[in-house]
Image (cartoon, rainbow, N blue to C red):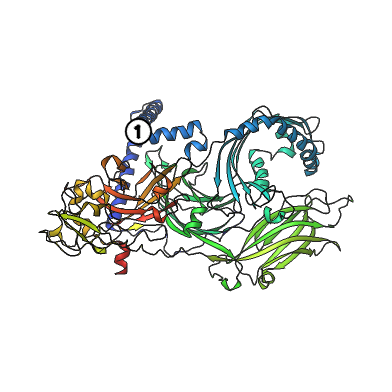
Amino acid sequence: MASAAQTHPGGQEISSVPGNTESLTPSAVNRILMEFMIYFGRAVVVFYPVYLTGYLGLSISWVLLCMLMFTWWQKNRQWKDVRIGSAIDLVDNEAHVISTELKTSLQMASWVHFTDVEKVQWVNMVLKQAWPFFGMYMEKLLRENIQQTVRMSNSALKMFTFTKVHFGYKPLRITGIRAYTHEVDQREVILDMNINYDGDVNIDADVNAAIKAGIKELKFQGMLRVILEPLIGQAPLVGGVTLFFIRRPTVQVNWTGMTNVLDSPAFSSLSEQSIIDIIASIMVLPNRMCIPLIDQIKVDVMRFPLPRGVVRVHVLEARDLVAKDTYMMGLVKGKSDPYTTLRVGNRYFKTKTIKENLHPKWNEVYEFVVHEAPGQELEVEVYDEDRDKDDFLGKYNLDFGEVKREKEMDQWFPLESIAHGEIHLKLQWFAPNSDPSLLKESNAGLSCAMLAVYLDNASNLPLTRRNAGPSSYVEISIDKDVQKSKVVYMNKDPQWEQGFTFFVQNIKTQQLTVQVKENEKKTLLGVLNLPLSRLFSISSMSVDQRFQLERSGANSQIKLKATLRILTEERPPPKIPQSSPPNVKQQTKAGGNTSASTPSAASAAPVASVSPNSTPAAASPVLPDVPPDGTKETSSAQPRRNSFLAPETSNPSNLNMRRYDSHSLLSDNSIASSRFDLTDAAAFPEAIRNHQGSFGEINLTVRYATIRNKLMVLVHSCRNLFPCSQNGTDSYVRMYFLPDQSWRHRKKTHVKKKTDNPVFEEKFEFDVSLAEAQTRKLDVAVKNNKMLHTRERKDIGMVMLDFSQMDLVKGVSEWFELTLPGLMSSSTRKRL
């Protein structure tokens, strides 16, 4: 997906703190001694029977028999533990377990899991009807074009011939389509198609008289992105169609005549991986298949547009990894030798290995070019390095669209498909810019600019000895970063039409080197040197022309387009706190007389409304003291029966129940939970009242599904919650969709026990129209399920989402800081 990436030798050190040192405190010494005693005890248990057997003169068969019985007992116990654990997990999380099993076993279509993905059965009916004609087209393409290309690729394939081409009766299926219209430009439409092909294709080929090859079955799966742009006001309404795979597709091939094929030197490298590489060189980003529909569209702009930006990935550290190394038949558990791999499309990088450490620190920097955001993903995987096969320690995929939206992300990401483990990444978004004044070169060797090169064609290349056009390719390089084009066979005027991207560290000294070479003998057919300072001096920072090749023929030229762009780091916009809502006049009845009073902003319940344009950590105003005798004040509401609100003040003696007008509970600053949780009228625990830091954050996604006419709220996780005990917090999330505040409208997640970073991943739906949803609010509270005193409040933190300030159709997904009524947030304390 990404066309270029940069890693610095040994990884860019961004921290001077060593990663593997530990101060020998008394507790650390005690822990080491305890581990040594455990290891020593296990060693005695293992080796003493062997010594006793030799001492008594018994046969070694007794030792082997005991080892066999112990191994059988251990495997049987593990199997029982897995069975019992699965049963308990099924009872506790029945819906989640069944959903996971269905995903892994049935491989259901994407429209089952994602509501915004449409089931397009009519498209599959069209494909089924047109499949025989597609087979006829592919047979003609293979015999007339592909066959000739294969023959020219290698001298051992001169007799290569397709003898049978049949694409079977099972058509290609599209399991779901997702359309993007709000997140993109108004003159384009983006479609993501999930393609699944499990066909009965039957293709046979003769390499020569003795060697035959063929394909009997083919499985293909991937996501194809289709871009319709630009939209125009005349037929055919679309200027061009661009197709490409965002990620590398998966391919499974059932070969025929495999034994004979593997004996041939021409097919020794032919495998499923090589097929994927061929597809990637044509239709995986940054490569695209472009179909212009009008003459005014430039093919080079469609085939290789400028990238959206650059993401700099800092692989900092990991923690709580799974220990995979064991000793003495698994009796002694060791640690792991972790390393991390990063992949974006065809670009792959690997960090250094940290020996015997479950909390490794890498501190390495990598850079990736982003062509599509959202769409392209950063695939992070952690492994334990071993001599034979490396053990898997977890993975995490991150869409670059989220990085583009946040501009900068510095957080811990939970590793998936593993019991536990987290990885700490810092990601920064850089936008390409053509303003030379924004150039800032880094002393640490990081990139300051990006060069995009579109290689078009060459003309009049020197002929070979056979008096025919050469089979040529191009090597394009900046210093040690060398990239190669495809090979064009037997043509003195080759057309490559490929794009490349490079990272630039020093514009004044670096230059672009282009070398045209012959494929078989690697002889030089021409060279071009283009200093980057020349591009920097041009106002547009771009050249698009034919260049004379050096050390080549008199009329040998090469046509390319080179564009230089300055990388500017985009900072997240400053989040301005939401202003206090307008004062609400409250009508109060007292002894038959109606009086109106306007409460001040400070007398409202202190839960700040949060919008995407306001800081989640907005300061919550503190409630003033209310006289306990209920005397009337000018700026406070008068009491009314059957309604109560629990204000929190700095004076513990006044922490008791107050009665307010019921209309105030429906005002902008009311707290829904205060009327229905009996403990909400009580005081906060003393530990919470004296807490000076943050109460934690909650990660929520809110989006309106226009097709289903439902508001969806996804509760992902919380982090850094206030620890309610030494063993962590038993927390859950409670929600009210205001003004619905009754018990039957209450939504809550499952309880996550003994953790300050719970992961919920639960979805809630509200049947409401879009217009109505934009006038309502969502009251979210994180609560402690296990309190020492029942009269203490359960709240760990709250947040109020004002949907009138959000684009619900586009959706919002971000972290919100938790606050508590009457207690200042961490950001407020910092300002004070």
As rendered, which of 190 and 384 lies closer to the eye? 190
Query: In this view of the protein, which residue sits in the foreground, 26 or 364?
Result: 364
Amino acid found under the numbered disc labelled 1 = Gly
* Left or right, 304 with reference to 589: right
Q: Which residue is depicted at the point 48% across and 64% down?
A: 571
The answer to which image quadrant residue 207 occupies is: top right
Q: In the image, residue 675 lies at what x, y percent?
A: 22, 48
For the C terminus, the image quarter is bottom left
Left or right: where does residue 546 sit relative to residue 566? Answer: right
Q: Given the current orientation, which residue lies at the most extreme left position?
A: 629
Does 651 sit left or right of 328 as displayed? Answer: left
Residue 9 image point, x, y percent: 56, 61
Q: Position of residue 283 (x, y in %)?
A: 66, 46
Give the percent coordinates (x, y) of residue 230.
65, 53
Where 368 falls versus 219 (above or below)? below
- What residue would you read off at disc 1? 85
